């Protein structure tokens, strides 16, 4: 007897995806997927390699591999203004960083690309970039500014100002510069899997949509429960979850296209076709 | 800032534990644990080795390691009568198997022990046991009876009678023989973890209790949703989930003690202390 296998779906084990996990749990949708939790780099690779069928992927990695992938409609991780967790921490104004050293504390493809793009094009500076472990004190002992992403960046947003440091939120800076929302990650399905299993992909996508609705209704409960295990209090987490934009509507797609065009201009990614990005089911 | 780490909890990736998983999902409790899904043998080993803090464990393995473990109260996987998924499939009556060959299609410690115990003591026969892959046709080509456990046993329960074979449900046989429920697996916490983190263990236990309540209310939904991915229809799954006994009350503990005493009599496990089993929080 032939039974369909559960789609292999990735999940980012970071704070910004806790609301996504919550909804998949509460709706019962976790029973319908084989979930692999990992860090973003591992999930990017697994999806590109074909070890996952569907998963979140850094926008930059999607742009590099868009020929093999389709986007799931209406979902992303982004911000329409401050994102709180993608920051540059610095002592002097950003437009004085020309020829100085900037430490990159993350391998996050999109956050790092955004930092380079804004420093070059908005602030007109070309610093030297060095990769370092994400320890703010150690980074600033050596460099003039530090790019932080994720939980450590969220922490720096609250603590660095007390140490006389300035924190520039790259989500806010992008919004100010481009007038558009920033999209950091998207959900993609492998094109070959979408062709052979369109019904399963539709089911997973619908499950994600239902899950997001549940999550939005229960965001304070998620924050309260997550605060037991995360080094942030419930109010901080609720505030963070609320600034995150999990949608991918017309404005977000415009932001994605704007970022893609500029990243292509910098030689970082192939050009997105003028009709792109290509969506599953459209 | 010191944040407690999530307890490392095991989950059996078999059909009989789908209701447990469902409740942990729907209640939101999955956010509070670091869940490792694996087969029973791997989970037994991980808990005994200390790679898990809390998890389900085969009753026989618990009895072998009870000095390092405490049981979580009120939860188990058992049956008070037929269990449907722990069976002997045979052509001739079981009391004719003396000197014959019985193929064991599973490494399940407790199910196999129960089969040997019942054949020896209830049916008065001492067959030769051989271990084989769980393929009923291949097993019966070579042996006179086959012990099946898990999903393949559940399938045989429905299909073997059509092939002129008899299926003896070992849960029902134990109940008839001992007058007591059978307990196949229990949930245990490592004694060292319980001593250092009693609050976390209490939290996990309470989460399991809440989860079981939710599951019991939604059992038909669980069955319906699971039937998409399992080779059984929703009615079969709902029937199976309903015969399973996830409680561990006074009668179940009496059944556990009876089984432990008989298994010790056969030299298979150390003696359980007269005051045992020892529970967390009592």
Image (cartoon, coloured by chain):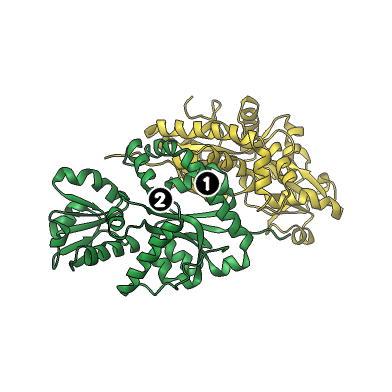
Chain colours: A yellow, B green
Does B106 sit left or right of A24 as displayed?
A: left
Front-most of residues A235 and A158 = A235
Structural crowding at the residue carrying mark 1, measured as other residues with C-alpha within 10 Å and reported as few (<14), some (14–19) or many (≥20): many
User: In the rendered image, which residue does mark 2 sit on?
Assistant: B245
Give the residue drawn at x 66%, y 38%: A219
Cα separation, mark 1 vs mark 2, equals 15 Å
Which residue in the rendered view is the most extreme toward the front?
B179
Residue A170 visible? The answer is yes
SS state under label 2:
loop
> Who's the residue at 61% across and 44% down the image?
A18
Q: Quadrant of residue B225?
A: top left
Tell which tag, 1 or 2, sits nearer the viewer: 2
Image coordinates for residue A74, horizontal then vertical, percent:
57, 29
Q: Nearer the viewer, residue A271 or B179?
A: B179
* Residue A58 visible to the viewer: no
Pick the quarter of the image with the N terminus of chain A. top left
* Quadrant in the rendering for residue A170: top right
Discs 1, 2: same chain: yes
**A45 sits to left or right of A260:** left
Residue plotted at (60% across, 30% down): A248
Residue ID for mark 1: B211
Q: Quadrant of residue A111?
A: top right
Residue B111: where, in percent of width, then height? 31, 60
Left or right: where does residue A208 sit relative to residue B258? right
Placement of A191 over or under B99, stated as above or below:
above
Report x, y in % for residue A271.
Answer: 56, 34
**What is the chain identity of the residue bearing mark 1?**
B
Q: Circle 1 — which element? A: helix
Q: Chain of mark 2?
A: B
Height in image: B194 above or below B146? below
The answer to whether the residue labelled 1 contacts the one labelled 2, judged by CB atoms less than 8 Å apart, is: no
Residue B262 image offset from top left, x and y in percent: 32, 69
């Amino acid at each position: 007897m032939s039974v369909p296998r559960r789609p292999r779906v990735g999940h980012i084990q970071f704070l910004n995806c806790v609301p996504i996990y919550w909804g998949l749990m509460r709706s019962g949708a976790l029973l319908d997927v084989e979930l692999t939790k990992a860090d973003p780099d591992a999930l990017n690779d697994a999806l590109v390699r074909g070890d996952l069928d569907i998963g979140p992927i850094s926008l930059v990695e999607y742009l590099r591999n868009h020929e093999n992938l389709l986007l799931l409609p209406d979902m992303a991780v982004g911000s329409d203004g401050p994102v709180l967790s993608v920051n540059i921490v610095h002592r002097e104004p950003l437009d004085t960083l020309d020829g100085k050293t900037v430490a990159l504390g993350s391998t996050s493809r999109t956050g790092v690309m955004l930092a380079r793009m804004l420093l070059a094009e908005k602030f007109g500076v070309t610093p030297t970039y060095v990769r370092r472990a994400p320890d703010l004190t150690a980074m600033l002992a050596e460099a003039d500014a530090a790019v932080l992403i994720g939980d450590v960046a969220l922490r720096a947003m609250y603590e660095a100002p007390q140490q006389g440091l300035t924190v520039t939120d790259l989500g806010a800076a992008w919004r100010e510069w481009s007038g558009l929302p920033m999209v950091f990650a998207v959900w993609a399905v492998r094109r070959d899997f979408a062709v052979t299993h369109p019904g399963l992909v539709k089911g997973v996508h619908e499950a994600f949509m239902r899950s997001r609705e549940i999550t939005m209704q229960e965001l304070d409960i998620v924050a309260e429960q997550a605060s037991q295990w995360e080094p942030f209090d419930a109010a901080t987490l609720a505030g963070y979850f609320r600034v995150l934009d999990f949608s991918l509507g017309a404005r977000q797609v415009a932001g994605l296209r704007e970022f893609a065009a500029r990243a292509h201009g910098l030689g970082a990614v192939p050009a997105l076709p003028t009709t792109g990005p290509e969506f599953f089911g459209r």
